[in-house]
Image (cartoon, rainbow, N blue to C red):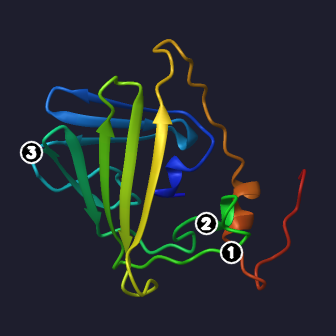
Amino acid sequence: MNFPDIFNAPYLFDVRVEGDALVIHNQPWEAERRIPLNNTDITTTPDGTFGVVRGRLEGTTVVLESNRFTPSKWGLCSATQFLGSGADVLSSEQKKLTERFTLSDDALTLSYDYTLEDRTYLSQPFKGRLQFTRLAADTPMYPYDCVEEAASMFSRTPEDAALSVGE
């Protein structure tokens, strides 16, 4: 799973500013991105899964622009979401993502607007918006234990060997 779809999953995440960086910690896979807000390109994971990202402030909105993602069969990860109906759109090295995080005036709602582009698989940019309600600061985040064999069923092809459950 990758961004932006990771925000569609029914798990918690934490977004905070630490010094001059935005830190986003997602419960699933213990995924964390620490992005300086000085418009500098950085790779947030050693394997480049989450691409190369740069961050900046536009007024009170944090803007992240990512590119150079690893091509993936998971693509938009729509197969795993309720609107995906089991189908997915692949992603290529052409994938580009612009994310905008804006906090409401009362600081209780975070709006997440994104634009996803991939000239290889999308004929036009895909735009989405999600809104999240703030939870109490002491709401616990539990470790997310992914069973790789179960998760692999979303990236399998008909030519792959059958899964062996329980062995």
Under circle 1, the secondary element is: loop
Let me know if residue 48 appears in the view: no
For label 3, the residue is 38
- Label 1–label 2 contact, CB within 8 A: yes
- Badge 3: few (under 14), some or many (20 or more) residues near its Cα, within 10 Å? few
Marks 1/2: CA distance?
A: 6 Å
Q: Residue most toward the front?
A: 105
For label 2, the residue is 78
Amino acid at pointer 2:
Ser
Tell me which numbered mark, 1 or 2, is placed earlier along the sequence: 2
Marks 3/2: CA distance?
A: 32 Å
| For residue 76, side relative to residue 113 (left or right) | right
Under circle 2, the secondary element is: helix
For label 1, the residue is 87
Residue 124 appears in which quarter of the rendering? bottom left
Q: Residue at x 31, y 29 (%)?
A: 16
